[in-house]
């Protein structure tokens, strides 16, 4: 069965989920192809992974808004490839796909994986979701909580028969615990896009308080990623006079992420909202203690004092307290890490994810 994916070309969960799904297909039931679509160039890591797996890939550059030229390019690729299923990693991609299918005349399933947090949706995103709910074969949500919010908000367009809930999955053969390297002090880290949707400013403020309060302990903060907020965050670090203890690693390729995660002692995910955080899944699978913002898309993954610690977003004092708590209590840190690992292996396997999607693909 040929499945053509359309996913964002830059950093984000789209590429991770696509390759996790392809890698889970050990029996080669499907032929995967992918269109990388977006205003950013295709990540070099994606290109290398596609080549290594002999996955045909295409790139379509997008301009803001309704970019009809890019839509025509997508339609052309669909007509050339003639897939059995088109898998959209965003409902906003529905417009060129519906037009292409109508022009082809072939019955093609459309699976939409809805991932955009509601507070970040543009009018185009909301329109795409409404059209998807009415016309796609299935719209897949990452959590029951997220589906229920959409159901309440878009009840006029919502049909239970057209929707499903399937959490993302990560490759547990890649994201797994590793022996800790010998180092002094405590390594704290976060990896994500450096954007306004994340709460790095709170993380940096909290870390500055850690340095001030625990002068007898050596701690270092590693911020992995890139984005529009990088310059402002670097300035914040300089203004707080903590440059000696903060390192911006830049964008890491996915092949480097397991090593980065396993080099840490505490992972912090400071964010203003998610649909389902791939970064948190990866970290939990590496048996790492997690402190995260108590927001939608995170608090359905992290259970406070169960498999991690939750703190209010934009509250540097609360985050500081949580970090110090884990620094001073290695027993609690190890317990949370073990529970996170168990939760990830039971719920976030890419093989389980593909099994659940196969129920839709093969229906």
Image (cartoon, rainbow, N blue to C red):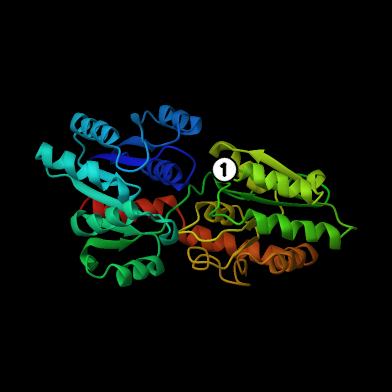
Does the rendering let one see residue 21? yes
The residue depicted at 79 percent of the width and 60 percent of the height is 210
Residue 208 picture quarter? bottom right
Residue at far left of view = 105
The residue depicted at 39 percent of the width and 60 percent of the height is 142
Q: Considering the numbered disc 1 on the image, is that residue within a helix, a strand or a loop?
A: loop
| Quadrant that contains the C terminus | bottom left
Q: Residues within 10 Å of mark 1 (few under 14, many from 20)?
A: few
Between 308 and 214, which is closer to the camera in this rendering? Answer: 214
The residue depicted at 52 percent of the width and 45 percent of the height is 173
Q: Is residue 234 above or below residue 36?
A: below
Q: Residue 190: give x, y in percent of width and height.
A: 64, 51
Q: Taking 301 as reference, is 242 left or right?
A: right
Where does label 1 land, which residue?
A: 228
Q: Residue 120: give x, y in percent of width and height.
A: 44, 56
Does the rendering let one see residue 179? no
Between 100 and 253, which is closer to the camera in this rendering? Answer: 100
The residue depicted at 82 percent of the width and 49 percent of the height is 241
Between 193 and 17, which is closer to the camera in this rendering? Answer: 193
Residue at far right of view = 216
Q: Taking 199 as reference, is 148 left or right?
A: left
| Quadrant that contains the N terminus | top left
Q: How many marks?
A: 1
Q: Residue 165: give x, y in percent of width and height.
A: 34, 62
Q: Residue 214: give x, y in percent of width and height.
A: 86, 61
């Amino acid at each position: 069965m040929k499945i053509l994916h359309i996913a964002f070309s830059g950093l984000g969960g789209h590429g991770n989920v696509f390759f996790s799904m392809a890698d889970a297909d050990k029996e080669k039931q499907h032929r995967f192809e992918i269109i990388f679509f977006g205003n950013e160039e295709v990540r070099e890591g994606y290109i290398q992974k596609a080549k290594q797996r002999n996955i045909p890939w295409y790139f379509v550059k997008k301009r803001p808004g309704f970019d009809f030229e890019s839509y025509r390019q997508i339609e052309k690729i669909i007509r050339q490839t003639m897939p059995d299923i088109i898998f959209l990693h965003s409902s906003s991609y529905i417009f060129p796909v519906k037009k292409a299918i109508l022009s082809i005349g072939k019955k093609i399933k459309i699976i939409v994986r809805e991932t955009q947090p509601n507070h970040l949706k543009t009018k185009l995103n909301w329109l795409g979701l409404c059209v998807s709910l009415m016309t796609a074969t299935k719209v897949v949500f990452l959590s029951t909580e997220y589906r229920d919010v959409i159901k309440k908000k878009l009840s006029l367009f919502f049909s239970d028969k057209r929707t499903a809930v399937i959490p993302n999955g990560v490759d547990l053969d890649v994201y797994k615990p590793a022996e800790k390297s010998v180092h002094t002090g405590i390594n704290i880290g976060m990896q994500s896009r450096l954007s306004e949707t994340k709460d790095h400013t709170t993380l940096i403020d909290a870390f500055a308080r850690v340095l001030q309060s625990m002068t007898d302990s050596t701690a270092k903060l590693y911020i992995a990623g890139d984005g529009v907020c990088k310059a402002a965050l670097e300035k914040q670090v300089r203004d707080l006079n903590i440059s000696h203890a903060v390192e911006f690693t830049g964008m890491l390729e996915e092949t480097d992420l397991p090593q980065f995660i396993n080099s840490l002692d505490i992972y912090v995910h400071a964010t203003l909202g998610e649909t389902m955080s791939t970064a948190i899944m990866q970290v939990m699978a590496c048996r790492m203690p997690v402190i995260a913002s108590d927001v939608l898309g995170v608090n359905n993954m992290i259970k406070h004092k169960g498999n991690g610690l939750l703190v209010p977003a934009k509250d540097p004092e609360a985050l500081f307290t949580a970090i110090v708590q884990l620094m001073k209590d290695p027993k609690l840190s190890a317990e949370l890490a073990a529970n996170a690992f168990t939760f990830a292996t039971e719920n976030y396997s890419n093989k389980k994810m593909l099994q659940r999607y196969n129920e839709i693909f093969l229906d």
